[in-house]
Image (cartoon, grey):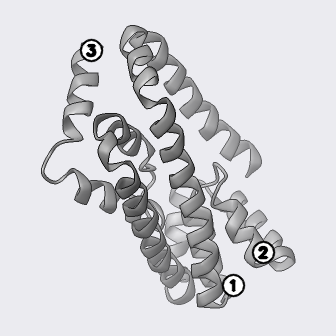
Amino acid sequence: MLQRAYNWILGFAHHPYALWILGAVSFAESSFFPIPPDPLFVAMLLGRRENTWRLAAICTLASVIGGWFGYGIGYALYESLGEFIVQTYGLQGAFDKFQTSFNEWGFWIIALKGLTPIPYKVVTISAGVMGMDFITFTCASLIARGFRFFSLALLFWYFGPPLKEYMEKNLLFVTLASVGALLGGFGLVYALS
C-alpha cells in the first residue's frame, strides 16, 4: 500500500496540472492554507528533475504573491479575516511574538522568519497589520522564500537520484521519519508560540 502511494505521488509530478497545483498551494500557504507546499514540491523534484529550477521559481513567486494576499489580509481585513485565520490554526502566540520581534528587527525578521518552521502566513499577516513598507516586505519575502525553495532544489539536484533510490529501498523508515519530523515541527511551532 505504501509503495502504491509513493508511486502515485511520483506519478502526480507528471500530471498536466501539477505545476498549477504546486503554485496554488504555495500561494495559499503564504496567506491562509495550513499545509506547506513541501511534500508536493519534493515529490516533483524527485519526479521531474529536469525542471528543478523552474519548480523552485514557481514556488518562490507563488509564495511571494500569496504573501501579498496575506499582507492585504493583515492590512485591511485583520479584524474580520486575519484574526480568524490566526486563531483557527492556534498561531496567536507565534503572531504576538512575531509582532514584538518585528518592531525590533523589521526587514530582517521577515527575511529570517520565512526560513523557520513558523507558518509564513503569520509573517505576512503580521507585516500587513504592522503596516510594513510594501516594497521592503516584497524584497524580504523574495529573499526568504527564494532561499528556502532554491536551497531545497539545490539539495535535491545533487542528492536526488541517490536519495530517491534510498527512499525506494527504505520506504517504511522514510515515511515514519517524515511523519515524525512533521509532528515534531508542529510541536516546535506550538512550543514556541
Q: Residue at x 48, y 65 (%)?
A: 30
Please tell me whether residue 43 is drawn above or below residue 145 in the rendered image. above
Q: Nearer the viewer, residue 7 or 190?
A: 7
C-alpha span from label 1 to label 3: 47 Å
Mark closer to the chain start, 3 or 2:
3
Residue at the limit of the structure toward the left, as seen here: 16
Q: Residue at x 45, y 50 (%)?
A: 36
The residue where tag 2 is placed is: 102
**Picture quarter containing residue 147?**
bottom right
Residue 55 percent coordinates (x, y): 36, 54
The residue where tag 3 is placed is: 3
Q: Residue at x 39, y 8 (%)?
A: 169
The amino acid sitting under disc 3 is Gln
Please tell me whether residue 61 is drawn above or below residue 74 in the rendered image. above
Disc 2, SS: helix
**Picture quarter containing residue 104?**
bottom right
Mark closer to the chain start, 1 or 2:
2
Discs 3/2, front: 3
Please tell me whether residue 65 is drawn above or below residue 98 in the rendered image. below
Q: Nearer the viewer, residue 157 or 77?
A: 157
Residue 11 percent coordinates (x, y): 19, 33
The amino acid sitting under disc 1 is Met
The residue where tag 1 is placed is: 130
Q: Residue at x 20, y 28 (%)?
A: 8
